Image (cartoon, rainbow, N blue to C red):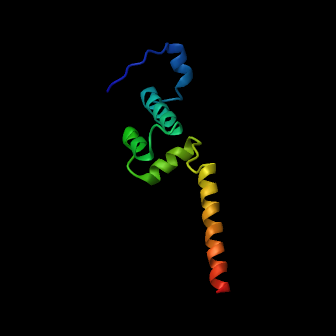
Amino acid sequence: MQITVDIPDDIAALLANSGEDLSRAALEAIGLEGYRQKRLGGYQLQRLLGIDSRYELDGFLKEHCVETYTAQDFEDDLATIRELEAKRKAERSA
């Protein structure tokens, strides 16, 4: 699908950093917003932006201040750690 957006020249000048391709910036913005809203997964964002590896995608997300490790991820990890500690204590007592 191809999308065309008309932007007044004076606003385009404000949005574009020197030499920046506004078409690419718009595509990245759409992809980032879709990823933040969990409408796109990492693989889909990679495909959309033509990023070759997960490592490069992680760098792109970090560059754009997108956190991929959520509070829920932390809670899940903490629960797993507590579960493993309880098993280890139980094994020592046995």
Q: Residue furthest left?
A: 1
Q: Whole-percent x and y of residue 76?
A: 60, 57
Image quadrant holding the N terminus, namely: top left
Tell which residue pokes out farthest to the front in this image: 94
Q: Position of residue 79 (x, y in %)?
A: 63, 62
Image location (x, y in percent) of residue 13: 53, 20
Q: Is residue 83 above or below residue 72?
A: below
Q: Which quadrant of the figure contains the C terminus?
A: bottom right
Between residues 2 and 40, which one lies in front from this camera angle? 40
Above or below residue 11? Residue 80 is below
User: Which of the pair 39/17 is nearer the observer?
Assistant: 39
Name the spot of residue 18 as percent of width and height, x first.
52, 29
Figure disc tally? 0
Residue drawn at the location 44% of the way across and 44% of the way down: 41
Farthest residue in the bottom direction? 94
Residue sitting at 44 percent across and 46 percent down? 42
Q: Which residue occupies 62% across, 83% down?
A: 91
Residue sitting at x 64%, y 61%: 78
**Closer to the camera, 19 or 76?**
76
